[in-house]
Amino acid sequence: MTFWDSLDHGERKAMTRIGREPRHPFEPGDTILRQSEHADRAALVISGMCRVLWHGENDRTTYLATRRGGELIGEMGLLDGGPRTATVIALRQTYVRWYAAEAFMALLAEHPGILGKVFLSVCARLKESDHHRIAIASAPARLRLARLLLRLADVEGVDTAQGIEVKVTQTDLGNWTGMGREAAGRRVRQLQQLGFLAVTPARSRVTVTDPAGLRQYAFHTEEPDDRSG
């Protein structure tokens, strides 16, 4: 259930009334919110999909989450009054409804039901993010990439004739797993040889051909030598 799904009719009307919807959507690759900027507004994703990233030193990024229609973005900066702690990038054509900081905080004061659901949404997403980070960080280096790809396939994947396609580069995979681009490339080729990923010349996409097999591999205690292992 998304944040929007959790609202009742009156709460939805209140949020629609104070929001502002730009005429044009964000296109894939556009920055919707930028890390370290002053948090002066939040947004509800109406449709589309966006990726939440943390930018560290040397232009390296860390994947935090993916947001879809019905979910809030940028609200944590308004709640704690600090600068934005992450950047949000559109993955697909994405429409949002903006909420200025003052109007958003006034809405929460007037509608305690919405306030409660905002906090429930934030808590659920923090748990989700913690679970994801622990699953990746606790995995042996050889399995981190497989677990990350499963996560991305679950939340961002698009069904194709070959399997579940995820838009991601080897540089991204190297950064997000902490293993570097070259090591990530070697792991991708290994997973292709095992039959879990499609062999494709595309450098900005990965296609998971056997999600069930990849999941068993990713959470197996021993690395199999072949598909029967």
Image: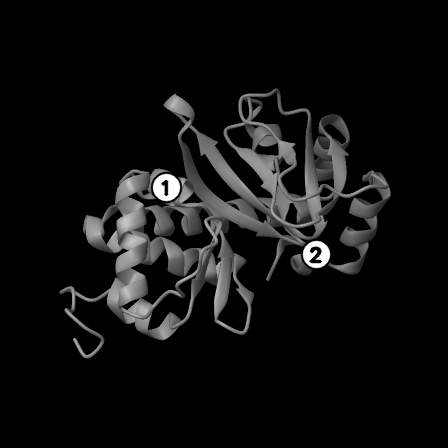
Quarter residue 226 falls in: bottom left
Furthest residue in direction front, as rendered: 201
Furthest residue in direction bottom, as rendered: 228
Q: Which mark is residue 62?
A: none
The residue carrying pointer 1 sits among few (fewer than 14), some (14 to 19) or many (20 or more) residues within 10 Å by Cα, namely: many
Which element type, helix, strand or loop, lies under badge 2? loop
Position in image of residue 98 (x %, y %): 75, 37
Q: What residue is shown at x 77% (from left), y 31% (from top)? A: 103
Q: What residue is shown at x 34% (from left), y 41% (from top)? A: 174
Query: Which one is in front, 79 or 23?
Result: 23
Residue on which the image places disc 2: 7
- Mark 2 to mark 1: distance in Å? 34 Å
- Which of the two discs, 2 and 1, labels the residue nearer the N terminus? 2
Quarter residue 83 falls in: top right
The residue carrying pointer 2 sits among few (fewer than 14), some (14 to 19) or many (20 or more) residues within 10 Å by Cα, namely: some
Residue on which the image places disc 1: 176
73 with respect to 60 (left or right): right
Image quarter where the C terminus lies is: bottom left
Indicate which label's residue lies in the foreground, 2 or 1. Answer: 1
Position in image of residue 25 (x %, y %): 77, 43
